Image (cartoon, coloured by chain):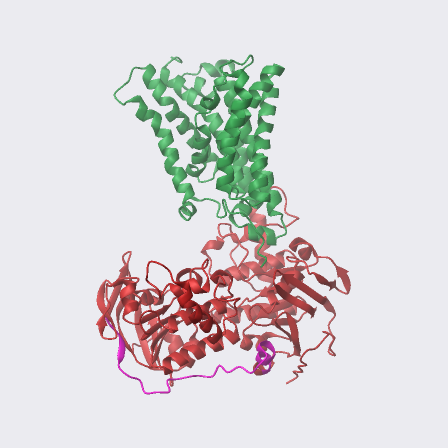
Amino acid sequence: MNDNIWVLMTGDSVALATTLILAALGALFTERSGVLNLGVEGVLLTSAISSFIAADSSGSVWIGLIVGSLAGALLAGIHAVLAVVLRANQIVSGLALVIFGTGLANYLGKPYEGKTISVKLTDLTFGPLTDIPLLGPILFEQDIITYLAVLAAVVSSLYLFRTRPGLEVRATGDDPATVDAQGLMVSTIRIRYTLFGGLVMGLGGSWLMLAESAAWHQAATTNGVGWIALALVVFASWRPIRLVIGAVSFGFTLQLPYTLQAENITFIPQAFLQMVPYVATLISLIALSRPGSTNALGAPKSLGIPFVRDER
Amino acid sequence: MTSSAHEGAQGPHHASGAAPVALEAIGIVKRFPGVLANDDVNFDIQTGEVHTLLGENGAGKSTLASMLCGLYQPDAGRILRNGVPIELPSPRAGLQHGIAMVHQHFRLVDRFTVAENVVLGSRDLSFKLNRRELNDAVAAVADTYGLPVDPTATVGDLSVGQRQRVEIVKALYQGAEILLLDEPTAVLVPAEVEKLFENVHAMTQTGKSVVFISHKLGEVARISDRVTVLRNGCVTGHVASKGQADAKELARLMVGRDIDLAAQRASHPIGHEVLQIRDVNLTMNGVNVLSNISFNVHEGEMVGIAGVAGNGQRELADVIAGLLSPTSGTISIGGAMSTDRGPIAARELGLAYVPEDRLGVGLVPSMSILDNLLLTRDRNIVVDRASVMPEATRLIDEFEIKANGPEHMARKLSGGNAQKVLLARELSGGRTATKLLVVCSPTRGLDVGAIETVRRLLDDARSAGQAILLISEDLDEIMSLADRVLVIYRGAIVHETPGETASLEKVGAAMAGLTQGSA
């Protein structure tokens, strides 16, 4: 019963969604503070290879996860310096981060190309719960980071909408001049959330490496998940709970072509199915890059606009 | 009259001195690149008074206020709170000393509720937000000062007057003892201004001090206990007015010369019809924006269109300018049909258009004055700047535009100077001599000196025989300039009267839609 391919597939979708949730959550926090970090893909790759190297040489997945997350924060720190401190164009800086992150990961990963990691993040088991038909393998056969990711989304939602710092970060993304007039430091808030966003993205990248891939295949390791994460934030209207739902559906569409292939269902050419998540990403990124249109979607009003106190 | 003005006064030390001085600024100097915004300014505010900072745009009022609330740091000078020297490195520090500023451009997050906006940045806010408690606390502060606001309303849905109230409640909630109100009436309709003045009185009654920043003489004379006048960054006078300062005297201190804003009418008999509008209707997105509009404007005549914003004025102007096509009806300029022929055809028939949005529609902000002039002149493929240069220099001189020269970028002009550039371009004629001038809110946001100039320019154009359609929300302006006043309400002309004999009451009632039909 539990071997039903569709059940397995949904379980895999939830698993794949973990990277998406973490990467998108990182982007969401960054964007909520008004900073647009398009470099998610680069951050994911760098953190993935960092976690690979750290886990492989230390023999501990936990060290891998920590190093990978820190690598993500470090890379986001470059964006913070460029975009917040130096007030550079955030789109250019973000794209530069993709190129830099990808190059750095390929350079660091050269000796590990195609290698399989010696340790792997294992799924938690909940004894009898896992044996529940249908829901068992979907809900109770995941690793701890997957559960953490979903929990993190719920906590993030509470944080953003029910706490004082949440109020402040949302205000910073919408209207930094207001926040500044209240004597809060816009730059500090933006740097903090850009770094934190990078940390969360880094955790996503590390998880992708240590639980999903297990082998380093350069850019194929992430396969554009970073771009999908950016699109996901738009789909979710910058709300963490919707983001989880979106991530699972994206995970499902990413998984679908392989499942159909395995089932020998071929009436839709596989190439078309593989395109779906990327086409959806393309559309929402176009929506994101059009000023004005994002307002209706619920984007932070000052997203991507550097804050300069209005001196003459 | 207890007014005592002394030009070039050095200190704020005056005889009255009954109430203690709550805040004092001594010898304040502030420089911005290329501008001396404040030059040795002295200013003080007593507990429970309304002290006005009066001056034209760019006189340094907002700069001074920004230093008093901690937004800018002075380059020299001292600030004393209750006689004790203080440092204000940030607005937060200002708040800690009980000083808060209500900015001209509201510092509110549109998507937040009133209560969220009020408590944003407040230090003693707990980590976890308890919305009900916050709403109650905000409502309590609002009630104390008679400022009715709904704490649960979303700020983006509120009117401008209500938003301003939220700003004031925010300042009071954060414990402000001294409120700096930066041009608070600039955005308000007359009824809201009255309400604001009541609130200001309620606040001063409870021992709050209010610094009122304005360039509107009538209001200043009414509300102020004392007035400090700034010109070009210097204090030009302190006037103790107790609510009855002499507006003429204030104007002289502010501008440095006597100002004349008296009514002006057509001095010559009016000539032929230049603009003819016949049964114009306009439907946009299924809404009737203009319905059955018909009127004429003659040579040497100024027709004023009065109305509350959003009643179809902008669309009417755009229809005449050829930017919008009417759903039905005809427009002719100088006897030739211009309907549906687009903006270039309208201009070739002698139309000049000064739109409401100076730097968005009127001028290209990132281009120089010269290039902006070229837009309506040269239509050759190769731009010939040299040929227009002498004219640009002449216009800058003639229209008294404060700029470094024809290469000065439009964006870097003040509102008044940008408007003068626009008027210079439109009035001086492009490829065709101007026959019809359509102007929208020409003096909005300008200071008294610039308003006087703009009005004189419009009057000169009328005397020169141009037909002028003046569309404005400033009723005073229409009443003192127009030869004929039309009132637009919900896209229809609901009232018409000669400017000379127009009654403010009747026109005001028609603007509000209370008309017995005399279209």
Residue A206 visible in the displayed image: no
Tell me: residue B510, above or below residue A252.
below
Q: Please, is residue A106 above or below residue B396 in the view?
A: above
Estimate the x, y position of residue A134 in percent, counting from the top left: 40, 18
Q: Which chain is red?
A: B
Task: Give percent across and percent down for residue B250.
Answer: 59, 79
Nearer the observer, B443 or B398: B398
The residue sitting at the right extreme is B84
Is residue B425 in the magenta section? no
Residue nearest the viewer, comparing B102 with B397: B397
Q: Quadrant of the C terminus of chain A?
A: bottom right
Residue B301 visible in the snapshot:
yes
The structure residue drawn at horizontal position 55% and vertical position 66%, both measured from the top left corner, is B184
Q: Is residue B251 magenta?
A: yes
The residue shown at (59%, 76%) is: B254
Relative side of A287 to A71, left or right: left
Image height of B302 relative to B121, above or below: below
| Relative image position of residue B246 (x, y in whole percent) | 59, 82
A18 or B20, which lies in front? A18
Question: Which residue: 40% across, 13% down?
Answer: A2
Q: Which residues are magenta?
A: B249-278
Give residue A275's position: percent from left, percent from top: 34, 28
| Direction from residue A111 to residue B12 in the image, left or right | right
The residue at the point 44 percent across, 32 percent down is A227
Q: Tally the marks.
A: 0
Classify the position of the N terminus of chain A by image quarter.
top left
In this image, B452 relative to B124: left or right?
left
Q: Quadrant of residue B242?
A: bottom right
Examine the rendered structure and indicate whether residue B168 appears above or below residue A45: below
Chain A: give its colour: green
Depth order, front residue of B416/B13: B416
